[in-house]
Amino acid sequence: MNIQMLCEIARVSKSGYYRWLKQADSSPQDYGDYLLIKELFDKGKGKLGHRAIQMGLKSDKDVIMNHKKVNRIMNKYRLICQVRRRNPYKSIMKKGSDHRTCENILNRNFQQSQPLVVLCTDITYLPFHGRFAYLSVIKDIATKEIVAWNLSWGLGMSLVFDTINNLKDNAISNLWNLDNVLIHSDQGFHYTNPEYISLIKELSMIQSMSRKGNCIDNAPIESFFGHFKDEVDYKGCQTIAELRSLIAEYIDYYNNRRYQWELKKMTPVQYRNHLLVNA
């Protein structure tokens, strides 16, 4: 049976067959590496890129593989990482006349070398089971560690107050001082509220705010929210208790087991300890 007949039976073009043949690789080593990569890719629900896969191979499988090779094999076997979509929703709440904005002290200086000195914070919405919940998070810019968070049904001021209280508890338990720690946010209703501003001053922290309409000014926290929404199937939760448990589990994973390329291939907690030892 000739090639032309086989192509007709398979309903593919002859040129398409030869193109596939050209791309095919008979190397058994490539296929073995593909199986290792696919295992991690599937475990990450198709949302891990070649760098994350490369770090996962080293940490989980004790396999050292060049990230360029990982990328080549992923492209060859069409393991396409799902691209994170821009968040289409932005809650806008009216500020009163007594609300005050602060200077953008951070000014996109995201390359911090000291842990627990510069923090960023924001709120995101989480649609699930026909309702919305709201997640407030505080992140250490130097280490990417999530140092405090809170979840609520509503957008009341208690959402951010409780997040700050969780930050205080974390600071006390880890023996670090909040004095002169900079906390950066957008110009949202919560962060311009006089009560929030007073609370930050009481803690001797320094408040910084993004320019109006510039989400890039708070890119580190937006990045975390994007990864969370990509990697966690939170929409399947039935109750807020289930959602809270899922968030706690993910943040523990993110802080302690999710290796990051920019952190010298360490986890946020490992990198924090590394910076403190080498300070």
Image (cartoon, grey):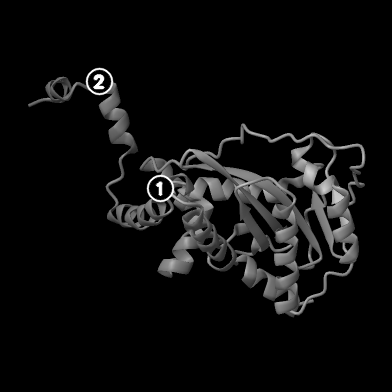
Percent coordinates x, y for residue 24 in the rendering: 30, 40
Q: Is residue 19 left or right of residue 45?
A: left
Q: Residue at x 76, y 36 (%)?
A: 93
**222 with respect to 82 (left or right):** right
The residue beneath circle 2 is: 13
Q: Quadrant of residue 251?
A: bottom right
From the image, which quarter does the C terminus lie in?
Answer: bottom right
Give the SS element for disc 2: loop
Give the residue type at disc 1. Ile
Relative to residue 224, is residue 51 drawn left or right? left
Q: Position of residue 255 (x, y in %)?
A: 59, 65
Q: Picture coordinates of residue 250 (x, y %)?
A: 52, 59
- Identify the residue position indicated by label 1 in the image: 73
- Residue displayed at 70% across by 63% down: 143
Instruction: Name the residue nearer the viewer: 24 or 35.
Output: 35
Question: Callout 2: 10 Å neighbours few (<14), some, many (20+)?
Answer: few
Q: Residue at x 79, y 68 (%)?
A: 114
Q: Where is 177 relative to 241, above or below?
A: below
In the rendered view, would you say 180 is above or below 239?
Answer: below
Residue 247: quarter of image: bottom right
Query: Is residue 94 placed above or below 157 in the rendered structure?
Result: above
